[in-house]
Image (cartoon, helix red, strand yellow):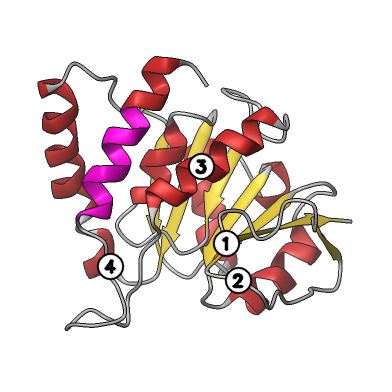
Amino acid sequence: MDESTKNSLIKLARFFDARQVGDVGPLGFRRSTNLTALLACAERLMAENIISPGRSTFMDLGCADGRVNLFFSYLMRISVGVELDEWTLDEYGPLRGELLEALEATGMAPPNKNVHLFHGDATDDAVHNRIIHETGLGLADFDFFYTYLVMHEEFAQMLVEKAKKGAVYMVYGLHKIMPRYPGFRLLEEFSPMEGVLALYEKT
């Protein structure tokens, strides 16, 4: 990872981690990814040549306010997100605007313009058809899938049917106990990365 990209991702991670939603408070049910931890994971994935910068394709199956999509926009050819709760997705625009101002003020590179977010159920074929129409990519064209530990089993079942062989399924929020999914191989040599992220490969 080049220094400019890393510095921008550090700034982005600090921006969103300061606005992280946890287990307490009025929005405690809506937990969000710690992007500082995700940055450490991404650096290792690049060092291991699992992520091919500018070539890999990424989909977040429950993207909330799009913070993980903005993060991966720096590293992926395309960064797609799907979110069921429209009011949560509505936060993307204002937060992105604040982030751009913060990055510009410090002379850092903004996220790439490769983020595509969709409102709907990530298991719904109608949503997948909208993604194909806008991006030209179907589920079988994505290299990486991401989810917080919500509906992880349902998403795994969908991906075992529709994702391509070798696709990587990243589940955030795991620690010592890591589930197994039929049709996927746990990448035990990497999991759990930073104590939170498990990686599975479609077999």
Residue 145 in the image, given as x and y percentages of width and height: 61, 53
- What amino acid is found at the position of numbered circle 1 in the picture? Gly
Alpha carbon separation for disc pair 1 and 3: 11 Å
Q: Which residues are magenta?
A: 8-18
User: Could you tell which of marks 1 and 3 lies nearer the N-terminus?
Assistant: 3
Mark 2 and mark 1 residues within 8 Å of each other at the beta carbon: yes
Quickly name the residue at label 4: 86
Q: How many marks?
A: 4
N-terminal label among 3 and 4? 3
Q: Position of residue 152 (x, y in %)?
A: 61, 74
Which image quadrant for residue 41?
A: top right
Label 3 and label 4: CA atoms lie apart by 30 Å
User: Separation of disc 1 and disc 4 at Cα?
Assistant: 30 Å
Which residue, given by chain and number where applicable, does mark 2 sit on?
Answer: 175
Lateral position of residue 5 relative to residue 12, left or right: right
Asked whether the viewer can see residue 138, the reply is yes
Instruction: Establish if 11 lies above or below 177.
Output: above
**Residue shown at 45%/64% (left/top)?**
62
